[in-house]
Structure formats: structure tokens, C-alpha cells
Image (tube, rainbow, N blue to C red):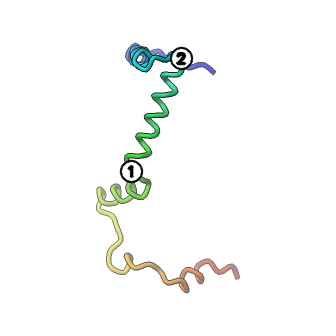
Amino acid sequence: MAINVNNAEADALTRKFADIAGVGITDAIVIAMREAIQRRRQEETPRETAARLLQKHGVGPTGVAKKPLSRKVFDEMWDER
């Protein structure tokens, strides 16, 4: 499978990284993408992302909404009668 890079900066950065890492261009791309994905995953959990976005937009549970439902209510909601 081929990747066609039509961006001079992307090409230059990839070649520079390959040189620094002492690997070929293909391995440089694989390494860089793995590291970028790992960094993104470590930045914040999905729960943290949701909390941050809710806070940013001023949305969130208040009062009674903060209290979890009882097991009985949950069971009644999912009753498959």
C-alpha cells in the first residue's frame, strides 16, 4: 500500500525524523504514528474528555441528577415484559 506525500514540509519532517531515528522513511512513519497515537491516548481518558466538554459548555448534572438510580429503578427500566 502506498502513501503519497505531496507536502514539502511533511516530506522534510519525515526524512529528518528518519535520519534522527536511524531508520528508513517507512519505519519513521510507523514509529511517528505509533508515538502520536499513544500520546493522544495518554492525554486524557474519554471520561475526562466528556467532563471537560460538559464543563466548557456549562452542562452537567445538578441536584437530584447527581444521585445514581437505585437498582430497582434500573431493573424496571430494562424489564423485558
**Residue 48 in the image: above or below residue 37:** below
Q: Which mark is residue 25?
A: none
**Residue 62 in the image: above or below residue 76:** above
Q: Quadrant of residue 64?
A: bottom left
**Regarding mark 2 in the picture, which secondary structure is present there?**
loop
Task: Locate residue 61, reporting x and y percent.
Answer: 35, 71
Give the amino acid type for the residue marked by disc 1 in the picture.
Glu
Mark 2 crowd level (few <14, some 14–19, many ≥20, 10 Å Cα): few
Task: Locate residue 5, reporting x and y percent.
Answer: 49, 17
Instruction: Check disc 2 and report the residue beneath it.
Output: 4
Report the residue at 55% width, 20% height from top: 3
Please state which of residues 34 and 69 is positioned toward the viewer in this rendering.
34
Q: Is residue 8 left or right of residue 1?
A: left
Instruction: Check disc 1 and report the residue beneath it.
Output: 44
Q: Quadrant of residue 65?
A: bottom left
Please state which of residues 4 and 13 is positioned toward the viewer in this rendering.
13
Report the residue at 48% width, 22% height from top: 28
**On the rendered image, what quadrant is the C terminus found in?**
bottom right
Task: Locate residue 48, reporting x and y percent.
Answer: 38, 56
Disc on the earlier residue, 2 or 1:
2
Distance (Cα) linking label 2 and label 1: 32 Å
**Residue 16 in the image: above or below residue 50:** above
Task: Locate residue 22, reporting x and y percent.
Answer: 45, 17
